[in-house]
Image: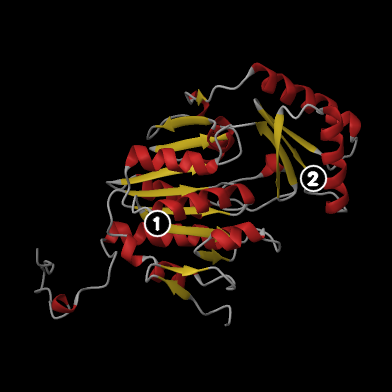
Amino acid sequence: MSQRQVVVRQGVAPAADGVGPVPVRTAVDACLSHLEQRPLLIVSDFDGTLSRVVDDPWGAAILPLGQRALRALAGLPDVHVALLSGRSAGDLAKRVRVGNAIYLGNHGMERAFLPRRGRASRLDVAFDTAADDAIHAAERLADELPVAVPEPWLVVERKPPAVAFHYRTAPDLATASARIRAAVDRLEPDGILERFPGRRVLELRPFGAVAKGEALATLVDELRPRAVFLLGDDVSDALAFLTLRELRAKGVTDGVAVAVQARTEVPPEVLESADLVLASPVAATRFLCALARRLAAGEALPRRPAERGLRAAPGRRARRPR
């Protein structure tokens, strides 16, 4: 099967199994049946999905088209927009700056709502409770690991009760990953924090803390969407993809899991759990923009056969039969 071919799973969405990235138009066409469902929930990761993956995590910026698409989607009736990221909710909101949206930071351990025309700097964030020992362990590791691994490519992201160690610019990724993991195991031998390896990052979080899968399930339970569009690019997003698959199987909701190829390497867990794959963050933002246009124009589905013969009189718009 060529990369331009798409397998349609149950007539709903293209399957990613064994298939490379698909064109944006093909992806949108495969999702049309979901667009007339209401309420509709759009959930997106940030790094590698709405922004290009850059060497410096603090230099990541949302692609302008993605921001415009999310703002358009957030302004539509019965359409909910949520950002679900490993970043803190405050940092996420400052980078995305889309109002009337839910911000789930730290993989769902933090939650906030930014109203339309609200200021991200005034975000009121609710935090999931975590044991004091986990908070102290994360802070201690953030201080001590740079001493144990004194490399210019190491970037420490503090987000209590979690901490992440990025090594995006390391000359040898496998060696860098092994050195960081060994240092973490030596400095935190009691295993207070759970290890979550990602793409060019090792994250440590409290055991039993909310992850993206649970965060998505909570959103679906609260908002009761009839369909969900879920976008992401890393291992943590695969957990949410699997949750969406389980919710579909139970008949709780419907929807599409969209993997984004942020770099040449895509974790196999992401490909295996996604319904379709887009080639880049640019393609992902074009996909969201296309969804926004379709929804705003009320063109979620092609006309039914009975409607194809309708023609609008001069100066009038044809009405669809009720």
Q: Who comes first in sequence, dot 2 or dot 1?
A: 2
| Residue indicated by mark 1 | 249
Quadrant of image for the C terminus: bottom left
Question: Helix, strand, or loop for circle 1?
Answer: helix
Quadrant of image for the N terminus: bottom right
- Up-down relation of residue 65 to residue 113 (above or below): below
- Packing grade of label 1 (10 A; few <14, some 14-19, many >=20) is few
Question: CB of mark 2 within 8 Å of CB of mark 1?
Answer: no
- From the viewer's side, name the closer residue of 198 and 209: 209
Q: Residue 97, can we see it?
A: no
| Residue indicated by mark 2 | 167
Q: Is residue 61 left or right of residue 301?
A: right
- Up-down relation of residue 293 to residue 150 (above or below): below
- From the viewer's side, name the closer residue of 120 and 24: 24
Percent position of residue 313, x then y: 8, 74
Question: Helix, strand, or loop for circle 2?
Answer: loop
Percent position of residue 118, x then y: 42, 30
Q: Residue furthest top?
A: 132
Q: Is residue 256 left or right of residue 206?
A: left
| Numbered circles on residues, count | 2
Which circle, 2 or 1, is nearer the viewer? Answer: 1
- From the viewer's side, name the closer residue of 94 and 26: 26
- Up-down relation of residue 250 to residue 165 (above or below): below
- Packing grade of label 2 (10 A; few <14, some 14-19, many >=20) is many
The three-letter code of the residue at mark 2 reads: Tyr
Render colour scheme: secondary structure
